[in-house]
Image: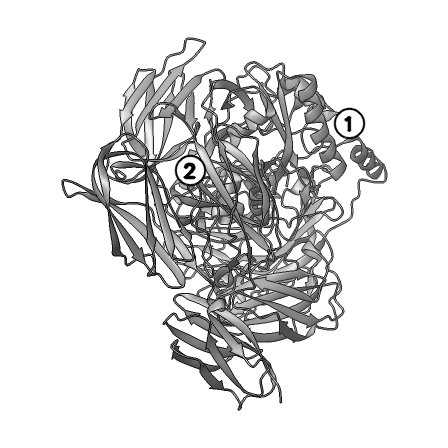
C-alpha cells in the first residue's frame, strides 16, 4: 500500500474526468456484515475484537446480543480490530464508494462529550493506530457534545479522541438525538473526497438492521481529505463515561465496506485424504479435488484440526511445518493452490499429524471457502531412518569476487537433494557433517552451526554459489562442499575420500573511502514523481541525473513499490529500472545507481527494500515475475538469503512489522538477508531542495531491539523521496559506506558487510575500528580484550559535542546501554576488559547542532587463550592399519608434552597416548600417532597440550569415521519367507539394536543383539510385503529393505 497518498497519472486522470462528466459517479463497493454480536452473554467480546478497558473484563461485554459498554469507574473503554483485509484502508486509493452502517445508542439523555468525567459514544470508522486515545488520526461518528444539543456528528481527529477539543467537525447537523436507538450510515466517495452522513431513528426501543431495515434521512454531506491518504486500518467502538451504573453505550449490526464481491462458494468439497512418502521428518498429503478453484490445507500436530479459514481472508502457506499462518495452537497452513498434493517437511519423527482440506473460490477479499465436511486425514511420521546417501559428490569448487570482507564460493552439484558448505579459517576443513544431524547455515562466517569448533556451516540448500561475509582481511579461508539427502534426523551426507574443496586468501585492507548516498527513493514507476518532474519512460534515469547534482551524494538506490495497489508497478517497468541503473552507472562512473524494489504494504507488515533480485516479486495477478503472497516476509527473506549478493533493509519499522519479527524467535535465515534498518526516514512528501527538511523523530529503538534479538544489521538513513526534484536534497540525511573504490561491487560489498553508518550530517567522516584496523560491521573472535577507536572529522569544521560507545549482548533481549562517553572531543579510545563472552558495540556521535550519527556495530567474542603453541593443523585420516592423527606446530613455548585423547560421543574423552613436545621452538614441527585400537564407527580425537608448570589446554576436536555401519552387516536371504539372518562382515564386537517397520512406519519387531556371531530372526507371523530393517550401533544406523514373500 503506498505511503505517499493519492497520485493521478495521465491515463487515470482522463478516466476520472470522463466519469465526472457523466455525473461524478463511481461504482459502489459491497457492504458486508462484520459482526451482529448474536452470541451468549460474555465479559469478553471475542470474534476478533481487541479490548482496551478502564477495568479489565467489565467495560466491554456481550449482553442481549449487543455490544454493551458499562462501568462504575470513570474512563474510556473501546474495542478495535484491523479491517484492512476488507477494503483498501488508505481511503482515497479505492475506486468505488465505501459504505459503513451500524447501530448505536447512548442511554444518557444528555451526553456531554469526550472530556474526562463526561459521557459520549463513538463509532471509529478508521484510525491510524489501535490506540484511539493518543497519537492516532482518523474519522469517527460521535454522539455527545458540550452544550445543549447532542447532535450526531462525523468528525476527524489528529491525536486521538481523548478530549472533545481533539475532534474536528466534518458534518454536524443541528439535531438533538439524545438516547434514541439509531441506525447510522456513512459513505465516502474518493472522487472529490465526498462524505455523507445518514440516520434512522424511527424504531423506538429496538435496533433495526442498518442495511435491510432502515429508512435513512440525510444529515448532510461534505468534502474532507484530511486523513483519506493515511492508512486507517483500525475500526472500533468507543464509550467515554463517568461512574453512573445505570448508563451504558450499545452497538449492534456493524457493516463495513468490502472492495469486491465474494466469489461463489464451491458446492463439492475435496475428499479422500491419503498419505505417501512417509518419512521421519516429512510426508506427502494427497487429496481428491472438489469443484473449487483452489484448496487450502491446514495441518495440526497431535490431534484433529480445529480451525477453519475465514471468507475474504488470505493465508500464508508453507510446506515447511511451522512457517505458514498459525491458525490455532499447533495448527498451520501448509498449502494453498490448485494442486492435489503437498510434501510437508520439518515434521517430528514418530508424531501424529492431522490435515483438513477446504475447497475455495476467489482470491484476496473475494475468497469464499466451503467449510462443511472438509476432507480430513491423520498419519504418523516414521521413526528416524537415514535417507539414501548421495553417490556423486560436488566438484569444481572455486572462489570469485574476492574482497577484504567477503568471497563468493562456487561449485558444481553432485546428485544429492541438497548440499552443505563448511568453512574454516587458516587451515583445511577436517570434520564433515554427521549423518542424522541437522545444521543451521549462516553466510556470515562464525554465525552458523559448527561441525567442530572453528568449522562453520555457511550454506545449505540447492544452489551452486554463496557469498560468504564477515571474514577478515589478509586471511586464508578453506571450504568444503558436501552433497546430502534428507533433512533433520534423516540427513545423510556424502563424504568422499578427497573432499570437494577450495581456499582463498582475502586481500589486506586497502584505504577505505567515505561514499555518501541514499538507498530508498521512488520514481514514476510506482508512486514517486509526485511533482511530475520525471514522468513516464526513463523516469529512473531522470531521477539519477537529479541525484547526481546533489551535494555529497555518490550513490543512490531507487526502490519502487512492488505492487499495483495505488502505485502501478509492472514487470516491464521493473526491468526498465534495472537496465536504466546499469546504463546510468556505465555512462557516469563517478555516480553509482542502484535499482530495486520496496516490498510489502504497511497494513500487512511493513516495507522492506530489496536489492540484488532482478525479478519483480508480487502478488497482483499477472503483475509479477515471481509470486510472493502479500505480507509473506518469510518467503522474501529466504529468497534474499539464497541469492548471492542480494540484501534487504527494513523501512520505517513498527514493532509488529515484518511478520512480527521482534515478537518471534531469532531466525538465522532472516539474519542472512537483512543488512540494515532505517533509524531515520523521510519526510517522504518533502518538496525541499535546500537540504533543510529533516525527518522527524527516529526509530533507533527498533534498531536496538533487533540487535538485542541477536540480528546483525547496521543503521541507515532513508530519504524516501517521492518528489523527483528532491533526490538527495530534501535534507542532509545520508547512509555512508566505507569502500575501497566508488564502483557497484565495492559499495554492494560494504552493504553486505554492514560497513556503513547513518548520519544527519551530509559530510561527516567517521572511522570506527577495533584492535587496530577492523572496521564497523566486523564480526570477530579473539583472545584479547577489544580496544575501540572512534575518530570524527567534518570538512565544514563542525565540532563534536558527545561520543557514546553503546554495547549489549546479542540474543539477550536487553537493549544496549552506554559503555563509555566522552564530551567535546572528536575521538574516543576505550578498552573493554572482561573475561569471556560476546558483545556488540556501536558508536553514537552528536554534534552541537543536534545532528546524530550512528555506526554499524562491531560484534566481538572473546575466548580463553589458546594453546601456548601455534598449532598450524590437527588432522586425521582413516587408514587400513588404524586412524592416523597428525599435527603441525609453527612455534612452541614451555611445551612439555601432548596428550592424545579419544571419545565415542565427543563429550567423554580418555587419554590413549602421550607424545613429548619440543619445549621451546620457533621452527615448524610435525607429530603423528597411529591409533590401531579404534574399531569401526565414529571417533573423536583432541589434543591436550601440557606446560612444564602444569597448566594445560585443549585443541579443537577431530572426528573420524571408520567404515560404514551397513558394510559391517549382511542380511540374507532377502527376499525371505519370514526367517532371515543378520551376519557380521567384520570381527568387531559391538551391541546393536534391531527394528523392523511396516509400510505405515509402525514398529513390528524390536530387539537388542550382541555382535559376536550371526543372528537368525523369525518374522513368519508377518504378512507378505516390503519392510524396513533398521540397525543401530555405535551411534550410527543403517537401513535395509526387507522383502517377505509367501
**Which residue position holds label 1?**
537
Residue found 48% across the figure and 65% down from its top: 329
Residue found at the far left of this picture: 949
Disc 2 crowd, CA 10 A, few/some/many (<14, 14-19, 20+): many
**Dot in front, 2 or 1:** 2
Visible residue check, residue 729: yes
Disc 1 crowd, CA 10 A, few/some/many (<14, 14-19, 20+): few
> Please, is residue 58 above or below residue 236 in the view?
below
* Residue 215: x %, y % from top left: 70, 58
* Residue 697: x %, y % from top left: 46, 30
* Residue 705: x %, y % from top left: 40, 41
For the residue pair 265 and 1031, the one nearer the viewer reads as 1031
For the residue pair 567 and 480, the one nearer the viewer reads as 480
Viewport quadrant of the C terminus: bottom right
Rounded to the nearest angstrom, the CA distance separating label 2 from label 1 is 49 Å
* Residue 721: x %, y % from top left: 61, 26
Label 2: which secondary element: strand
Mark 1 or mark 2, which is nearer the start of the sequence?
2
- Residue 370 found in image quarter: bottom right
- C-beta proximity under 8 Å, tags 2 and 1: no
Residue found at the far front of this picture: 881
Apparent side of residue 515 relative to residue 945 in the rendered image (left or right) = right
Visible residue check, residue 151: no
Residue found 38% across the figure and 67% down from its top: 1034
> Please, is residue 840 above or below residue 267 in the view?
above
Residue found 58% across the figure and 80% down from its top: 974
> Please, is residue 41 above or below residue 449 in the view?
below
Label 1: which secondary element: loop
Viewport quadrant of the N terminus: top right
Give the numbered dot on residue 425.
2
Amino acid at each position: 500500500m503506498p505511503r505517499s497518498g493519492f497520485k493521478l497519472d495521465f491515463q487515470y486522470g482522463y478516466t476520472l474526468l470522463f466519469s465526472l462528466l457523466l455525473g461524478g459517479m463511481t461504482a459502489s463497493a459491497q457492504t458486508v456484515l462484520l459482526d451482529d454480536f448474536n452470541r451468549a452473554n460474555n465479559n469478553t467480546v471475542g470474534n476478533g475484537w481487541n479490548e482496551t478497558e478502564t477495568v479489565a473484563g467489565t467495560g466491554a461485554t456481550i449482553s442481549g446480543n449487543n455490544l454493551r459498554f458499562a462501568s462504575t469507574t470513570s474512563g474510556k473503554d473501546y474495542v478495535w480490530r484491523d479491517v484492512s483485509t476488507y477494503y483498501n484502508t488508505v481511503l482515497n486509493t479505492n475506486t468505488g464508494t465505501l459504505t459503513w452502517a451500524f447501530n448505536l445508542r447512548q442511554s444518557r439523555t444528555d451526553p456531554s462529550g469526550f472530556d474526562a468525567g463526561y459521557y459520549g459514544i463513538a463509532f471509529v470508522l478508521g484510525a491510524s493506530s489501535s490506540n484511539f486515545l493518543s497519537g492516532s488520526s482518523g474519522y469517527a461518528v460521535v454522539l455527545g457534545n458540550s452544550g445543549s444539543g447532542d447532535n450526531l456528528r462525523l468528525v476527524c481527529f489528529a491525536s486521538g479522541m481523548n478530549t472533545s477539543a481533539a475532534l474536528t467537525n466534518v458534518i454536524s447537523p443541528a439535531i438533538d438525538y439524545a438516547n434514541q436507538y439509531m441506525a447510522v450510515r456513512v459513505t465516502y466517495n474518493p472522487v472529490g473526497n465526498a462524505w455523507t452522513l445518514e440516520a434512522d431513528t424511527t424504531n423506538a426501543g429496538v435496533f433495526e438492521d442498518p442495511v435491510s431495515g432502515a429508512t435513512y434521512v440525510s444529515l448532510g454531506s461534505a468534502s474532507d481529505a484530511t486523513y483519506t491518504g493515511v492508512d486507517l486500518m483500525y475500526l472500533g467502538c468507543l464509550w467515554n463515561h463517568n461512574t453512573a451504573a445505570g448508563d451504558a453505550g450499545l452497538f449492534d449490526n456493524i457493516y463495513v465496506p468490502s472492495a469486491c464481491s465474494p466469489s461463489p462458494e464451491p458446492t463439492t468439497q475435496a475428499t479422500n485424504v491419503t498419505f505417501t512418502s512417509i518419512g521421519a521428518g516429512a510426508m506427502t498429503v494427497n487429496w481428491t479435488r472438489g469443484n473449487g478453484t483452489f484448496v487450502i490445507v491446514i495441518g495440526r500436530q497431535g490431534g484433529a484440526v480445529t480451525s477453519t479459514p475465514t471468507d475474504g481472508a488470505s493465508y500464508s502457506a508453507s510446506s515447511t511445518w511451522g512457517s505458514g499462518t498459525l491458525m490455532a495452537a499447533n495448527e498451520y497452513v501448509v498449502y494453498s493452490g490448485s494442486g492435489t498434493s503437498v510434501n510437508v517437511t520439518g515434521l517430528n519423527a514418530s508424531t501424529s499429524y492431522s490435515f483438513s482440506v477446504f475447497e475455495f473460490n476467489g482470491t484476496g477479499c473475494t475468497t469464499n471457502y466451503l467449510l462443511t465436511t472438509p476432507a480430513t486425514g491423520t498419519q504418523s511420521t516414521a521413526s528416524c531412518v537415514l535417507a539414501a546417501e548421495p553417490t556423486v559428490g560436488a566438484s569444481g569448487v572455486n572462489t570469485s569476487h574476492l574482497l577484504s570482507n567477503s568471497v563468493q564460493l562456487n561449485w558444481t552439484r553432485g546428485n544429492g537433494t541438497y548440499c552443505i558448505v563448511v568453512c574454516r579459517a587458516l587451515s583445511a576443513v577436517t570434520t564433515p557433517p554427521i549423518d542424522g544431524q541437522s545444521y543451521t547455515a549462516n553466510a556470515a562466517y562464525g554465525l552458523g552451526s559448527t561441525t567442530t569448533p572453528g568449522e562453520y556451516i555457511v550454506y545449505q540448500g540447492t544452489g551452486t554459489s554463496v557469498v560468504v561475509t564477515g571474514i577478515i582481511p589478509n586471511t586464508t579461508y578453506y571450504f568444503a562442499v558436501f552433497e546430502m539427502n534428507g533433512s533433520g534426523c534423516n540427513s545423510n551426507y556424502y563424504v568422499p575420500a578427497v573432499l570437494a574443496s577450495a581456499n582463498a586468501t582475502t586481500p589486506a585492507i586497502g584505504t577505505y573511502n567515505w561514499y555518501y548516498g541514499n538507498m530508498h527513493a521512488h520514481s514514476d514507476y510506482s508512486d514517486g514523481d509526485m511533482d511530475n518532474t520525471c514522468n513516464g519512460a526513463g523516469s529512473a534515469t531522470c531521477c539519477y541525473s537529479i541525484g547526481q547534482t546533489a551535494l555529497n551524494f555518490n550513490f543512490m538506490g531507487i526502490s519502487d513499490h512492488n505492487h499495483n495497489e495505488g502505485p502501478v508497478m509492472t514487470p516491464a517497468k521493473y526491468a526498465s529500472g534495472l537496465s536504466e541503473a546499469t546504463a546510468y552507472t556505465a555512462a557516469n562512473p563517478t555516480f553509482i545507481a542502484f535499482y530495486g524494489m520496496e516490498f510489502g504494504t504497511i497494513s500487512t507488515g511493513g516495507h522492506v527494500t530489496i536489492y540484488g533480485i532482478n525479478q519483480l516479486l508480487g502478488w497482483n495477478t499477472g503483475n509479477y515475475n515471481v509470486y510472493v503472497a502479500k505480507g509473506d516476509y518469510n518467503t522474501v527473506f529466504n529468497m534474499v538469503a539464497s541469492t548471492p549478493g542480494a540484501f534487504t533493509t527494513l523501512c520505517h519499522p513498527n514493532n509488529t512489522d515484518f511478520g512480527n519479527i521482534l515478537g518471534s524467535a531469532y531466525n538465522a535465515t532472516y539474519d542472512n538477508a537483512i543488512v540494515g534498518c532505517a533509524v531515520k526516514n523521510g519526510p517522504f512528501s518533502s518538496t525541499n531542495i535546500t537540504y533543510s527538511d529533516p525527518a522527524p523523530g527516529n526509530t533507533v529503538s527498533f534498531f536496538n531491539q533487533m540487535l538485542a534479538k541477536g540480528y546483525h544489521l547496521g543503521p541507515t538513513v532513508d530519504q524516501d523521496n517521492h518528489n523527483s526534484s528532491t533526490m538527495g536534497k530534501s535534507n542532509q540525511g545520508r547512509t555512508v559506506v566505507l569502500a575501497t573504490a566508488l564502483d557497484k561491487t565495492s559499495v554492494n560489498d560494504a552493504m553486505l558487510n554492514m560497513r556503513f553508518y547513518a548520519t544527519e550530517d551530509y559530510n561527516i567522516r567517521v572511522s570506527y575500528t577495533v584492535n587496530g584496523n577492523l572496521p564497523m560491521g566486523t564480526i570477530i573472535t579473539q583472545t584479547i580484550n577489544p580496544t575501540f577507536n572512534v575518530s570524527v572529522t567534518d570538512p565544514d569544521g563542525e565540532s563534536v559535542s558527545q561520543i557514546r560507545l553503546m554495547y549489549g549482548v546479542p540474543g539477550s533481549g536487553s537493549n544496549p546501554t552506554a559503555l563509555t562517553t566522552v564530551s567535546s572531543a572528536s575521538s574516543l579510545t576505550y578498552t573493554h576488559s572482561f573475561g569471556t563472552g560476546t558483545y556488540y558495540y556501536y558508536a553514537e556521535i552528536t554534534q552541537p547542532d543536534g545532528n546524530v550519527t550512528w555506526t554499524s556495530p562491531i560484534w566481538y567474542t572473546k575466548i580463553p587463550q589458546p594453546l601456548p603453541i601455534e598449532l598450524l593443523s590437527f588432522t586425521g585420516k582413516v587408514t587400513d592399519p588404524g586412524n592416523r592423527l597428525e599435527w603441525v606446530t609453527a612455534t612452541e613455548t614451555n611445551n612439555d608434552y601432548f596428550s592424545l585423547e579419544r571419545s565415542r560421543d565427543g563429550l567423554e574423552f580418555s587419554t590413549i597416548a602421550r607424545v613429548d613436545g619440543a619445549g621451546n621452538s620457533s621452527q615448524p614441527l610435525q607429530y603423528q600417532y597411529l591409533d590401531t585400537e579404534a574399531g569401526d564407527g565414529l571417533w573423536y580425537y583432541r589434543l591436550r597440550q601440557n606446560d612444564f608448570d602444569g597448566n594445560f589446554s585443549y585443541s579443537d576436536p577431530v572426528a573420524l569415521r571408520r567404515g560404514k555401519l551397513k558394510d559391517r552387516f549382511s542380511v540374507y536371504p532377502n527376499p525371505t519367507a519370514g526367517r532371515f539372518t543378520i551376519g557380521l562382515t567384520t570381527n568387531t564386537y559391538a551391541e546393536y539394536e534391531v527394528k523392523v517397520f511396516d509400510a505405515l512406519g509402525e514398529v513390528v519387531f524390536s530387539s537388542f543383539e550382541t555382535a559376536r556371531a550371526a543372528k537368525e530372526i523369525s518374522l513368519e507371523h508377518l504378512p507378505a510385503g516390503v519392510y524396513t530393517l533398521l540397525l543401530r550401533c555405535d551411534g550410527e544406523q543403517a537401513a535395509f529393505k526387507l522383502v517377505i514373500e509367501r
